Image (cartoon, rainbow, N blue to C red):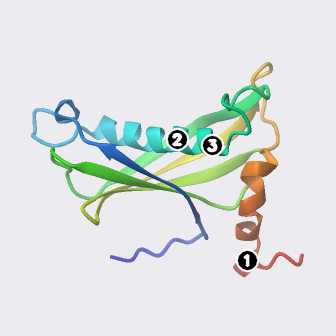
Amino acid sequence: MSVHHPHPRLLVHTSIQPMRWGDMDALGHVNNTVYFRYMEQARIEWLFAVATSHDPYASGSGPVIVNASCTFLQPLVYPGDVEVRMFLAGPGRSSVGSFYEVCKDGRRYAEGAAKIVWIDLATGRPTPLPEAIAGPLHALATPRGDTST
């Protein structure tokens, strides 16, 4: 199933996570809140992978989520592993859109999104995205990837 996205996206991380029996609810499927944990885990894995030290907050700045959403396409049912694909869109000065596909056995079960804003940890105010994050995304911010402007 191919989905058209209105804005270009770059696949930045893929996370394989085991489903747990406790992820299910009384209706016999994975509880809706757990999808947000799956996406969070993928985001944290990505953050630690791109951090320049073992502590991604050591520089005095770091990411916060200002909004998050999930569209549930079909119910997940234990057992199995979920594959969470994390994509980023073109960056802003201090924020970037992140997008997620939650899949199992090659089928998409949910799509999610979260706006990530980089902040100064001392002041709580937005600060520019680190170049390690923004750099690879600059081509997405211009029409058709044209970086000549």
Q: Quadrant of residue 59?
A: top right
User: Which numbered disc flags the more N-terminal residue, 3 or 2?
Assistant: 2
Crowdedness near tag 2: few (<14), some (14–19) or many (≥20) residues, C-alpha within 10 Å: some
Check contact, mark 3 vs mark 2: CB within 8 A.
no
Q: Position of residue 146 (x, y in %)?
A: 79, 79
Q: Residue at x 44, y 46 (%)?
A: 69
Whichever of callouts 3 and 1 sits on the residue coming sooner in the sequence is 3
User: Looking at this view, is 114 or 58 the one in front?
Assistant: 58
Distance (Cα) linking label 1 and label 2: 27 Å
Residues marked 3 and 1 touching at CB (< 8 Å) = no
Residue that mark 3 sits on: 116
Instruction: Locate the N terminus by quadrant.
Output: bottom left
Badge 1 is on which residue?
A: 145
Q: Give the x, y percent position of residue 14.
A: 46, 55
At horizontal 74% and vertical 26% (from top left) the residue drawn is 58
Residue 92 spot, x, y in % from top left: 75, 53
Discs 1/2, front: 2
Q: Quadrant of the C terminus?
A: bottom right
- Quick one: SS at disc 3? strand
Mark number displayed over residue 118: none
Residue 45 is tagged as 2
User: Quick one: which residue is furthest to the top in this view?
Assistant: 122
Reply above or below: 69 against 6: above
Total of numbered circles in the picture? 3
Residue in the image at 71% along x and 61% along y: 137
Query: At numbered mark 2, what does the secondary structure look like: helix, strand or loop?
Result: helix
Look at label 3 and name its amino acid: Ile
